[in-house]
Image (cartoon, rainbow, N blue to C red):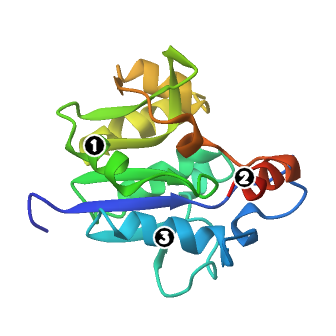
Amino acid sequence: MSESTTCAALLAGGRSKRMGHAKHDIQIDGKPMLQIMAELALSCCDDLIIAGPPGLLPEYDHASDVPEHQGFGPLAGIEAALLSGRGNRWLILPCDMPRLRSSDLVTLLQHAATICCFSDPKDPDRMLNLPMALDASHVCNLTQSLDAGIRSVGRWLTMENAAMVAPLDPVTTINLNTPEDVEQIQNND
């Protein structure tokens, strides 16, 4: 693997309780949201891995939670991706932010900090947990945090002293968690 290898991990293993069904299957602009996010990831990364159940976008490799962290949420999915050894620099994406822009993600990837995320456009003192960019070197700290019972992405980012990058346009950071969120994004197109 070369020094400049960047890999995206697309988190698609959530339960989607508020949505009521799998988010990754939701159609936005005539495409499943997971496909939109995969295409976005590959527009700025060398490789892509799906952190979620096998069978989602079978053309890509999948990373499953390590057994001792199975069911620990997004942090376990991030750990699984990093442990794959596929990249030196990682872009971690949720499956439910279909309005993100490639140029913004490149800004994250090129940031000098070893771990960074966007600040909330509505509250610049608050960080958005995802998307994030990080160096693979954070995997040991991540594993130790999971072993210590840390499950919150935000808490882990704070512990890692994640840098915050200037706010995005609020439209690009819409996170689709409920049917009303989907309706809102479709009505604004």
In the picture of the structure, the residue carrying the numbered disc 3 is 38
Rendered image: mark on residue 20: none
Tell me the element at label 3.
helix
- x, y percentage for residue 137? 24, 42
Nearer the camera: disc 3 or disc 1: 1
- Residue displayed at 37% across by 54% down: 82
- Find out whether the residues at labels 3 and 2 contact each other: C-beta distance under 8 Å: no
Image quarter hosting the C terminus? bottom right
Horizontal side, residue 63 vs residue 161: left or right: right
- Does residue 17 appear left or right of residue 159 in this picture? right
**Residue 135 seen by the camera:** no
Name which residue type carries label 3.
Answer: Ala
Q: Is residue 76 visible?
A: yes
In this orientation, which residue lies closer to the viewer: 130 or 67?
Answer: 130
Q: In which quadrant is the N terminus drawn?
A: bottom left
Q: Quadrant of residue 113?
A: top left
Residue 107: give its label: 1
Label 2's element? helix
Most foreground residue, 140 or 165: 165
Q: Amino acid at mark 2?
A: Ile
Q: Which one is in front in this view, the residue at disc 2 or the one at disc 1? A: 2
Q: Is residue 117 above or below residue 127?
A: below
Q: CA distance from mark 2 to mark 1?
A: 24 Å
Where residue 33 sits: x, y (%)?
Answer: 64, 67
User: Label 1 sits on what residue type?
Assistant: Thr
Label 2 CA crowd tier, 10 Å (few <14, some 14–19, many 20+): some
Where is residue 36? Give x, y as percent: 55, 70
**Pointer 2: what residue?**
185
The crowding category of the residue bearing disc 3, from other C-alpha atoms within 10 Å (few below 14, some 14 to 19, many at least 20), is many
Q: Earlier in the sequence, mark 3 or mark 1?
A: 3
Q: CA distance from mark 3 to mark 2?
A: 19 Å
Badge 1 crowding class, 10 Å Cα cut-off, few under 14, some 14 to 19, many 20 or more, is some
